[in-house]
Amino acid sequence: MERKNTRVIRVGNVLIGGNNPISVQSMTNTRTSDVVNTARQIKDLEEAGCDIIRSSVSSIEDAKAIPKIKEQINIPIIADIQYDYKLALEAIKYGIDGLRINPGNIGSLYKVKEVVNACKKNNLSIRIGVNSGSIKKEFLDKYDGVNADSMVYSALEQIRLLEELNFYDIKISLKASNVPLTIEAYKKMSEVCDYPLHLGVTEAGTPWRGTIKSSVGIGSLLAMGIGDTIRVSLTGDPVEEVKVGREILKSLGLLKDGLELISCPTCGRTNINLIKIAQEAEKILDGIEKPIKVAIMGCAVNGPGEAKEADIGIAGGNEEGLIFIKGEVVKKVKEEDLLQELLKEINKL
């Protein structure tokens, strides 16, 4: 699929926009001033494949923690600022890699200028974020409520504030908990500007429901060529956000890193405990970084034939199974030995 060519901005050592890889983001849920637990969580997120992390900066203690956190992590960190421009300045002073702040929410123009000048001096980018629940009343009145127009034009007002100060290192998010609205808003914004877009469905919900909503919303936009960086918002462990985000990219062929696992849904022909095997395979193979596709299939019909595009896989039989590589059977093993033998063959690849 062809991606829209957007401007390129930088967050630390990560480039966003243009032809650069689509990055996966998350947000810590610790108190940022708690350096030990915040750094530990970010390291867990790094291990899961997170490219950029965002943390709330709600106090001077949070800002002062930034350099101590950065000493222990390897990915860029963005400060999430609400209203207080002085905290934005403090976060910049203490070495933050980017800001998430809406200039219209921080008061007088001189305050916006101070933040913008500090960002220019330190080569920092700003993310402008408009959620469906935080649209200014004038746009709600003008465009008849919450819709793509009121979201987009609310964001454009924020952008113009920065552009009037000759600041263009901007990325934009337009999130709603309603998936069709999210898709429509991002599509409209993509048509009217070329700033990179940060995709997400806000307040998506628990890992089960939120994964579905995020996959539909983010996946639909990415399939249209829209989007430069993503965050899956789940009520749970942020590591799950990163895992889901990476799988969304993999499913669209936008991320080639790491192992991809496919499995059949089972049917009456299945004579092995495929559900258990697939679940155990997901755990055992998690973390393998080889860019290969592994298939866990219930029978010979759905084995080497239907999964011939897989690099390696299992096809179940009667309490035994076949291991195949590139569609060719290489060995037959007992059901209880399938995963260990599969792992051995994967390690040989």
Image (cartoon, rainbow, N blue to C red):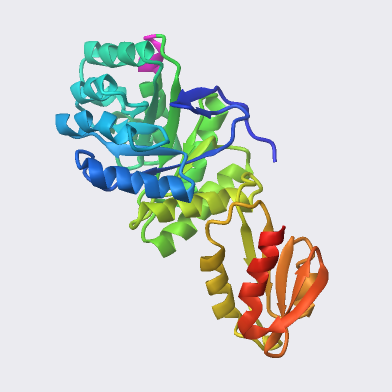
> In the rendered view of the protein, which quadrant contains the C terminus?
bottom right
Please state if 17 lies on the left or on the right of 346 as rendered: left
Of 283 and 147, the residue lying toward us: 283
> x, y percentage for residue 184?
51, 42
Q: Position of residue 17 (x, y in %)?
A: 55, 28
Image point 43% across, 52% down: which residue?
Answer: 241
Q: Residue furthest right?
A: 328
Helix, strand or loop for the magenta stretch, by majority:
helix
Q: Is residue 73 above or below residue 6?
A: below
* Res 108 → quadrant: top left
Q: Is residue 309 above or below residue 198?
A: below
Pick whichever, 67 or 138, lies toward us: 67
Q: Residue 134, located in which quarter of the rendered image?
A: top left
Q: Is residue 2 visible?
A: yes
Q: Does 253 appear above or below 277?
A: above
Report the span colored magenta. Answer: 160-165
For residue 301: magenta?
A: no
Instruction: From the top left corner, tell me how far across and down residue 305 is, in percent.
Output: 81, 71
Q: Could you tell whether 70 is left or right of 340 in the image?
A: left
Q: Residue at x 30, y 42 (%)?
A: 39
Side (left or right) of 20 relative to 140 = right
Q: Residue at x 35, y 16 (%)?
A: 119
What percent of the width, then of the height, locates residue 243?
48, 54
Front residue of 326/68: it is 68
Say above or below: 47 vs 90: below
